[in-house]
Structures are given as structure tokens and as C-alpha cells.
């Protein structure tokens, strides 16, 4: 039994619709009784076998597109982690009783990803509804007119499939542009001497592979300035604003007298950038010799310092409103705290800790507990662990950037 007294295996088998579970490699792991009945196959003939070995295209039909369209849909679900509802498909099936004899069949498939706790695709749920009898019944009742309607329906479905493919190709090209933009604006950090750092960048589940979050690490004499920021919105427009603000703050950190002054410069600059208002950012300067962290925040979630003994401190004593939302005359606040060797510093954006319908303090507490529990792990492994533990199974609705440093 699974869950509160519910036998999900029994529920799966009792579903009235035909459903199969496939691995990301498109091998059957399970099917329900309705699927076996619709397919005319036994469980032994299906489970453990590659989908298109069980159901290949009709070799006598050179125009058959069933396997090509279905494979494209399933592989797209695995790649994007998004549901895909296919247009009406003609997909002939070989008769189980008469080898070499193919039955004309029509289907309406839907493919849905089943995500693992780390957000990857563990399985693909493949649901099919057969509409063969409906089409044939209309043809039998209506003669030539119904046959014409049947032909029109199938033609329109194929046209819809082709339009969808063109749209997906355009989206893939836009995503490729987004990836190049990301690499240009968010390069991997340079080595910080013997200090170890890790960065992670993850767009929202439904966004392109770029977003309005950024990170930056700037080497200064005896010090390192670490910053993260979050522009309102997603996609290419937010990413363009992000690139401008990241560059401006990176330059300001090199000449300003501390992180508070750097954020003041960024605030002034942001007023001439459309879409920059309400951006949040935080900057921390690490003094390696004095073992002091100096920090200032423009409305951003507080960085976290985890000490070697597991105690956690939120750097929240120098928080001011976001960019473009404060008086001109007042200087931004500045605070500092000491650290010991072996501590871990984490800067992040709100996508890591916020969940819909939940107070942000709950997310901050989850982060603090996970950071303390895994504090001895190397930064790269620690970054992966935090993302895996803090990201909901269905993915996030906000972008996420994460920077970890072993002090």
C-alpha cells in the first residue's frame, strides 16, 4: 500500500483509460489492463520491451508517420519535462492473431512526464484514446459525405501536427539563442586562489534557459566581492536587463568603498534602465586576512553563513528597499560579521526558498537546516545537494541562482 491507505498499483490497473509507463529510453515498465485490451497484447509481450519494437510502422504503408510523430513527442517530453498532447494520429497495428496483417487504427495520444525528486524525468506516462470505431461509424452512416469528413479531419490533424513542429523548431532556435546569451553574460567564475566556490543557475520550469537572476565574483586585493541579483520577470527581456545590471555592479564593486556604496551606484544607474525597477541585489565583500564579511542588501533574501560547528547566521542587518524604491539622500546600510576557516557562505535568489502559499521563513529554515546538515561537503557537491533538496518535485515557478564559497 502507498500513501494513506491507497493502493496506487490497483488504482493504475483500474483506470478506464489506456495508460502505459515508459522509461526515458522508451522501454515499457508497466501498462494497465485497459492498455492491454486496446493493444490486443499480453503483458509479457509488452513490459520490458522497446516501444517501437512492439508497435512498428506498417511496412506496407510508405506514408506512415505514426512512429516518427510519437517518438518526437516522447523525446520532447523527456527533454523539456513538459506535457505534450498530440494531434489525431493514424497508427496501424499488426494483428496479434494474423502476423503480417495490419489493422487501420486512429489514436489520440497524450504524453506526460513523471518527475523524480531531483526534477529529472523518471518515467513518461503515455495515455492513448482510440477513435478508430468513431471514425468508421461515421463513415458507415454517412457514405461519401462521411468519408470526405473523415479525410478532412485526418488532413487537418496532420496539418496541425506540422504547424506544431514548426512552432517547436522556432522555440528550439530561440532557446539556442538564449543559451548563448546565458554563457556570454554568466560565465563560470574564475579560480579564487585556494578558496573553493560553486555556482548554479536554473531558470523557472516554464521559462527559457535564461532569466533575470545573476551572480558575480570579483577578485580584489586581499578580498573577494560576491553578488547576486534578481530582475523582475523571466525570459530574454529580463535577461537583457540582468546583463546591464550585472556589468554595472561588477564595475562598481571594483572602485566603490564597500558593498553599500556599490549598491548606491547601481541604484543610480538602474533609473535609466527600463525594467530595472524593483530589482533586488545583495553584495558581500570577503576580507580573507581579517576574516570579516562586509555586506549590504537591496531588498534581497539574506545570505547565509554556516560555521564549522553547524551554527547558522543570516546576514540580515543591512537590508534596504530594492533598486529605485528608496530616498536619494539616505546612504544604504552596511554591516559586518566575522567568520572562521571552514565556514560556508551561501548567496542565492528567492527561487531557492520561496514556494506558493508558504511563508518565506519556512523556506529560509529549510535552507539553513540543509546547509548545516551538509556543511562538510565540497562546494560543488553541496550546491547539487541543496538544489535537489530544496527544489519542489514539479520544479520552481521562479528562477534560481546559487553561489557557495568555502571560507
Image (cartoon, rainbow, N blue to C red):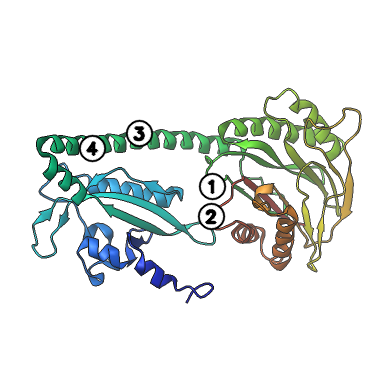
- Which residue does the numbered mark 2 point to in the structure image? 394
Q: Which residue is depicted at the point 21% across and 57% down? A: 55
Q: Is 178 positioned to the left or the right of 335 in the image?
A: left
* Image x and y of residue 160, in percent: 31, 36
Looking at the rendered structure, the number of numbered marks drawn on it comes to 4
Q: Of the residues tagged 2 and 3, which is closer to the observer?
A: 2
- Which residue does the numbered mark 4 point to in the structure image? 153
- Dot 4 or dot 1, earlier in sequence: 4
Q: Residues within 10 Å of mark 2 (few under 14, many from 20)?
A: some
Q: Secondary structure at mark 4?
A: helix
Asked if the residue at tag 4 contacts the one at tag 3, i.e. Cβ–Cβ closer than 8 Å, the answer is: no
> How far separated are the C-alphas under marks 4 and 1?
34 Å
Q: Which residue is depicted at the point 66% across and 36% down? A: 232
- Dot 4 or dot 2, earlier in sequence: 4
The C terminus lies in which quarter of the figure?
bottom right
Q: Secondary structure at mark 2?
A: loop
Between residues 274 and 147, which one lies in front from this camera angle? Answer: 147
- Which residue does the numbered mark 1 point to in the structure image? 205
- Dot 2 or dot 3, earlier in sequence: 3
Q: Which residue is depicted at the point 26% across and 35% down? A: 156
Q: Is 261 positioned to the left or the right of 281 in the image?
A: right
* Image x and y of residue 98, in percent: 8, 62
Asked if the residue at tag 2 contacts the one at tag 1, i.e. Cβ–Cβ closer than 8 Å, the answer is: yes
> How far separated are the C-alphas under marks 4 and 2?
35 Å
Q: For residue 252, say whether it is visible.
A: yes
- Dot 1 or dot 2, earlier in sequence: 1
> How far separated are the C-alphas under marks 1 and 3?
22 Å
Find residue 270 and report its image quarter.
Answer: top right
* Image x and y of residue 364, in percent: 74, 56
- Which residue does the numbered mark 3 point to in the structure image? 166
Q: Is 329 positioned to the left or the right of 26 in the image?
A: right
Amino acid at each position: 500500500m502507498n500513501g494513506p491507505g491507497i493502493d496506487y498499483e490497483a488504482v493504475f490497473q483500474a483506470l478506464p483509460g489506456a495508460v502505459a509507463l515508459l522509461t526515458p529510453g522508451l522501454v515499457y515498465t508497466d501498462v494497465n489492463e485497459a492498455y492491454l485490451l486496446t493493444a490486443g497484447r499480453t503483458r509479457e509481450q509488452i513490459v520490458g520491451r522497446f516501444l517501437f519494437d512492439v508497435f512498428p510502422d506498417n511496412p506496407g504503408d510508405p506514408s506512415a508517420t505514426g512512429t516518427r510523430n510519437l517518438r518526437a513527442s516522447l523525446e520532447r517530453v523527456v527533454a523539456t519535462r513538459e506535457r505534450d498532447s498530440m494531434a489525431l494520429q493514424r497508427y496501424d497495428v499488426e494483428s496479434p492473431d494474423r502476423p503480417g496483417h495490419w489493422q487501420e487504427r486512429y489514436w489520440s495520444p497524450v504524453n506526460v512526464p513523471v518527475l523524480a525528486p531531483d526534477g529529472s524525468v523518471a518515467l513518461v506516462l503515455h495515455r492513448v484514446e482510440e477513435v478508430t470505431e468513431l471514425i468508421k461509424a461515421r463513415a458507415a452512416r454517412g457514405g461519401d459525405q462521411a468519408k470526405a469528413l473523415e479525410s478532412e479531419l485526418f488532413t487537418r490533424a496532420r496539418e496541425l501536427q506540422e504547424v506544431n513542429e514548426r512552432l517547436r523548431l522556432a522555440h528550439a532556435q530561440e532557446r539556442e539563442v538564449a543559451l548563448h546569451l546565458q554563457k556570454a553574460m554568466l560565465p563560470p567564475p574564475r579560480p579564487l586562489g585556494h578558496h573553493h566556490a560553486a555556482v548554479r543557475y536554473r531558470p523557472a520550469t516554464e521559462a527559457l534557459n535564461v532569466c533575470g537572476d545573476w551572480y558575480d565574483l570579483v577578485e580584489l586585493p586581499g578580498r573577494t566581492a560576491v553578488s547576486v541579483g534578481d530582475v523582475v520577470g523571466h525570459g530574454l527581456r529580463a535577461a537583457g536587463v540582468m546583463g546591464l545590471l550585472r556589468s554595472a555592479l561588477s564595475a562598481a564593486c571594483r572602485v566603490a568603498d564597500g558593498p553599500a556604496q556599490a549598491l548606491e551606484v547601481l541604484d543610480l544607474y538602474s533609473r535609466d534602465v527600463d525594467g530595472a525597477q524593483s530589482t533586488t541585489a545583495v553584495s558581500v565583500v570577503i576580507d580573507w586576512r581579517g576574516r570579516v564579511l562586509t555586506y549590504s542588501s537591496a531588498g534581497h533574501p539574506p545570505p547565509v553563513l554556516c560555521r564549522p560547528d553547524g551554527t547558522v547566521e543570516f546576514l540580515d542587518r543591512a537590508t534596504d528597499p530594492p533598486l529605485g524604491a528608496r530616498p536619494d539622500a539616505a546612504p544604504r546600510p552596511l554591516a559586518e560579521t566575522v567568520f572562521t576557516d571552514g565556514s560556508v557562505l551561501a548567496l542565492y535568489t528567492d527561487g531557492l526558498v520561496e514556494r506558493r502559499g508558504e511563508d518565506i521563513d519556512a523556506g529560509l529554515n529549510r535552507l539553513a537546516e540543509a546547509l548545516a546538515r551538509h556543511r562538510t561537503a565540497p562546494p560543488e557537491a553541496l550546491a547539487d545537494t541543496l538544489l535537489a533538496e530544496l527544489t519542489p518535485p514539479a520544479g520552481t515557478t521562479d528562477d534560481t541562482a546559487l553561489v557557495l564559497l568555502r571560507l
